[in-house]
Image: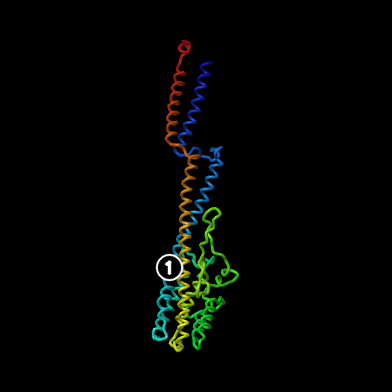
């Protein structure tokens, strides 16, 4: 009876050892302490919290990763717009001279070409989205760039410039500013959405949720400033200032040189407006650059935290391979010894057992 009990005990121990060996073998194969999350108790709540935090960090990092190329494309467009503003403000407008009416035709041609280029740059896309359209990502903020030199705004400015003379330079300047600010249909070169005072005209900048409780403004508008503040001879918008200056140069003809004082005053206004546009564009570029740097830093921080969270989660879910292999070998040795003992006990005769 004692022999039977001993065999039964050894068999039960061997069964436990086999189960332990199978569990250790699965851990070596999967690298995990448990195949089912419920088997991690009592550390399961902590593991779930870590996974949720990792998912948030992944989402933030992914959103930043999608946004950074768009900001880079916007920086490229702003840079080219700034070049246009400086070229005309520091070059073409400075050379406007009532004593040199023959040069006006070339300046006008250059200005008309630049207006088209400005419209095209404002229609810059990245990832299939228009960058200067506010939240209207699917439609161009400037519906017809090629028509800018002959559109409503340019026509109104040309009409005002055509009346220059007789000491009315200030009045003409005010008229060109009003034309650049006019958002009525048929005059504004901007999209219906951006020009609507109840929609794009008042909406806040698009923001990116880049971290817990952190919304980073990233949106831009074709018809108004985002982060920049215009000063000096300005409509309050660097885009409108730039288009106003270009349209004014495009409208100048030798007829306006008949009143040298008014022509000079108008040239000064044009130059000041273009310089205001260039200054505000520089501010816009700087602010956008700071946003890029901040997002890149946050992305790096998310990546660092991800590594830390992964290490913490690994400590809960993953095995120490060396330690598990050691336990597996020890269990295997013990099991083999148990089998040997069971075999030896089973082969004993009654006489041998009683000796």
Tell me where residue 322 appears, x and y as whole percent.
42, 35
Image point 53% across, 60% down: which residue? 207
Give 224 or 193, whichever is nearer the viewer: 224
Could you say which is closer to the camera, residue 327 or residue 164?
164
Question: Which quadrant does the N terminus fall into?
Answer: top right
Count of marks overlaid on the render: 1
Q: Is residue 340 visible?
A: yes
Q: Is residue 295 above or below residue 235?
A: above
Q: How is the image coloured?
A: rainbow
Q: Is residue 169 above or below residue 300?
A: below
* Residue 138 visible within the image: no
Instruction: Describe the element under mark 1 as helix, strand or loop.
Output: helix
Is the residue 162 above or below the residue 86 in the image?
Answer: below
Q: Position of residue 289 (x, y in %)?
A: 45, 62
Dot 1: within a 10 Å radius of its alpha carbon, few (fewer than 14), some, or many (20 or more) residues? some
Kindly identify the residue that appears in the image at 42 percent across and 31 percent down.
326
Q: Position of residue 251 (x, y in %)?
A: 46, 83
Q: Nearer the viewer, residue 322 or 271?
A: 271
Residue ID for mark 1: 79
Image location (x, y in percent) of residue 337: 44, 23
């Amino acid at each position: 009876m004692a022999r039977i009990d001993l065999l039964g005990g050894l068999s039960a121990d061997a069964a436990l050892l086999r189960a332990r060996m199978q569990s250790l073998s699965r851990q070596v194969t999967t690298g995990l302490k448990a195949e089912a999350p419920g088997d991690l108790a009592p550390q399961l709540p902590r593991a779930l919290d870590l996974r949720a935090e990792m998912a948030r960090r992944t989402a933030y990092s992914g959103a930043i990763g999608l946004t950074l190329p768009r900001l880079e494309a916007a920086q490229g467009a702003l840079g080219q717009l700034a070049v246009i503003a400086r070229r005309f403000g520091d070059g073409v407008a400075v050379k406007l001279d009532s004593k040199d009416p023959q040069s006006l035709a070339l300046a006008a041609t250059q200005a008309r070409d630049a207006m088209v280029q400005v419209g095209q740059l404002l229609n810059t896309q990245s990832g299939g989205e228009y960058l200067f359209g506010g939240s209207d990502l699917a439609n161009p903020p400037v519906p017809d760039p090629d028509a800018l030199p002959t559109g409503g705004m340019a026509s109104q400015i040309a009409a005002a410039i055509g009346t220059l003379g007789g000491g009315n330079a200030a009045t003409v300047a005010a008229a060109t500013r009003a034309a650049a600010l006019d958002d009525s249909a048929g005059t504004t070169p901007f999209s219906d959405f951006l020009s609507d005072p109840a929609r794009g005209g008042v909406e806040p900048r698009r923001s990116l949720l880049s971290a817990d409780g952190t919304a980073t403004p990233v949106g831009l508008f074709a018809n108004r400033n985002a982060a920049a503040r215009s000063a000096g001879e300005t409509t309050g918008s660097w885009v409108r200032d730039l288009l106003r200056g270009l349209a004014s140069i495009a409208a100048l003809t030798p007829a306006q040189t008949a009143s040298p004082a008014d022509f000079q005053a108008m040239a000064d206004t044009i130059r000041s407006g273009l310089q205001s546009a260039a200054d505000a564009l520089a501010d816009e570029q700087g602010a956008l650059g700071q946003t890029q740097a901040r997002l890149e830093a946050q992305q790096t921080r998310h990546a660092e935290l991800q590594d830390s969270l992964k290490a913490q989660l690994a400590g809960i879910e993953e095995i120490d391979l060396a330690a598990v292999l050691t336990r597996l070998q020890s269990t295997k040795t013990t099991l083999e010894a148990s089998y040997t003992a069971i075999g030896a006990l089973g082969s004993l005769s009654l006489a041998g057992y009683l000796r």
